[in-house]
Structures are given as C-alpha cells and as structure tokens.
Image (spheres, rainbow, N blue to C red):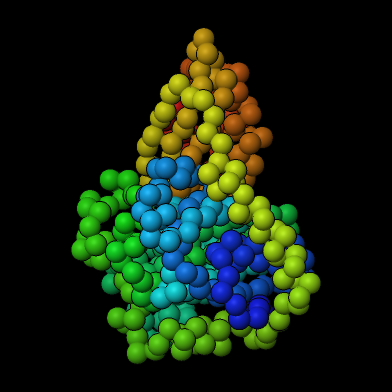
Amino acid sequence: MVYISIPEKDRRLSFYLAMEEHIARHLDEDDCFFMWQVRPSVIFGRNQLIDNEVNTAYCRSNNISMYRRKSGGGCVYADMNNVMFSYITKDENVSFTFNKYIQLVVEVLQKMGVDAVASGRNDIMIDGKKVSGNAFYHIPGRSIVHGTMLYDTDMQNMVASITPSDSKLVSKGVKSVRQHIALLKDYTQLTLSEFKDFVRRNLCKRELKLTAEDIKNIEEIEKEYLADEFIYGNNPRYTMIKKQRINDVGELEIRMELKNNIIKNINIMGDYFLTGDIDNRILQPLQNTPYNKEAISKALPDRIDDIILHLRKQDFVDLL
C-alpha cells in the first residue's frame, strides 16, 4: 500500500474529502492510504438531514465546522486529538473492500497489543466499546473508505454537537457516551504521534508526495464540499414520513409527497450504506406509482440489498 503525504498545513476537513476524490480519479495506484487531523468539526453522511443530526446552534457558537461527506453512515465529531483514516483502492466491490479495510485496521491494533475486533456494520470495538466508525462510497473504478480513530477527544463537544436519535443513545450526557466509547490512549503507551507512525509503518510500503498541481486540483474539488447547497441539501416538499431502524441496515427516514394517493416525490434519508444506483433503481421507479403495496413492490427490482446494504425488499416495502 502507498502512503500519500502532503505538505504540513492547517487545512479544513473538506480538503481531505476532496483529496480522497483526487487520489481516486487521478492516481494510478492499486491501494492508497493517508491520515489526517482537523480542528473541531462535525461530518455527517450523504443521506442525512443536518437538522436531525447536528446541533447547529452549538456548533456555530463553539467554532465547530460542519461538513457533509459523499459516503453513507452516521454523524461523527473530529478534532486534533483523534485521527481520521482514508483508504482508496481499485477494488470496485465496495462491501468486500469495506470488510478488508476494517480487518487491516483491526490487525494493526492487535499488533500494538490492543484487543480490537470488528463489530456490526462498520465499527471497531475494544472491550465492547466503539473506538472507530467507518463509511464508504464508490466512484467508477475506485472504492473509498474512511473512518475515525478515537485516540482522545473532547467529550463535551462530541456530545453537544451531535444530536443522536433516542434509539442510539439512552442518555445524551457525557457519562453515558463515555460508557459506549473507547479512547485508544487508555489501551496503549504510544502517544498519538507514535501511534500514527506505527500505523503508517505497518500498513504502507512506500510514500508518494502530492505535487503543487495535485494540491491545486484538490482545492478545486473542495469547492463542491463547501457549497451551502451540498452541505445543507435541498429538502423537497413531503406529506408523509416513515421512519424505522432496521437491523444491519441502519436508520431509514422516508419522505414522500403524495397526491391523490400517488407518490409524486420520494427521498430516503438516514445512516444506511449505499452500494448501488438508488436514483435510477429505487427513487425514479417509485415516482408516479400508486401508494399501495402491490404497485410499490412491482415498481421495485427483485433485490435492493445491492443498492442499500443488507436491506431486504420486503422490509422496505413494509416500511413504505
């Protein structure tokens, strides 16, 4: 694996998301990896509503930046006391790539003497507590995986900046969250800098430095991530909301505009993982479909678990 390095500079989180895209689109390497740290920031998933996931008032008053990414999954908080990982590969099977990447990280932690295990859809756990959450998305010819590694963090900011649903956390207090979160500093003698060096040595065989031209291209891509339309999204009209958490899939919030019992518009929000073309295979076929089980089932393809990871068609139809 190749480690991608850039000149040291205080950069926004959006730069690193754009850097992933640049590497995926322009670097002809099989497997690339890099690590990054940012000032206090909240990053939420492609299909999430910011008002559902982020305490925007707290973030603005406490200088916590807010960003949307292009992968699915949930909302996370990051600061300079933890580290973010990015992995870009030519392998186009996103599910396989995702599991492969998580196992690579688990093996590095175990090599450090940390008893880490993969768990659930996207987590790495220590002592039954989450130390890393991960997400992925796909562009033609490449898969991109990125995630957090909680070495340490500002728990007050983490709790106050993110607004989780009641099903995720019984209490929103720091004490409750701390019972569910593992901080790597409690399980290793390595400093954060030493930990980063260890990961780099054990995952990567050589280094590639980005050029000034690369940086310029990344900053051009970054403009999309900084646009208000991308960050805040367009919220179409709706007359009905269906919401449910489905095991191994995540939380789905379906918003529909119905007219004369016909689905005129539909959007699927949530922290699910997207692995296929949701627009052409789910959303568009459902437009102008009568709002009944038979019509909805007929409009959908036989399988949708290759579009939304692990989602069975029957569960989706029942939710609608």
The image shows residue 151 at horizontal and vertical percentages of: 39, 76
Q: Residue at the front extreme? A: 61
* Relative to 229, 78 lies left or right: left
Tell me the residue at 42%/54% (across/down). 60
Quadrant of the image occupied by residue 120: bottom left
Quadrant of the image occupied by residue 100: bottom right
* Relative to 293, 180 lies left or right: left
Q: Quadrant of the N terminus?
A: bottom right
Tell me the residue at 51%/9% (across/down). 260
Tell me the residue at 59%/33% (across/down). 282
The image shows residue 215 at horizontal and vertical percentages of: 72, 71
Q: Quadrant of the C terminus?
A: top left
The front one of 153 and 33 is 153
Q: Is residue 231 visible?
A: yes
* Relative to 210, 102 lies left or right: left
Above or below: residue 248 compared with residue 278: below
Q: Is residue 90 visible?
A: no
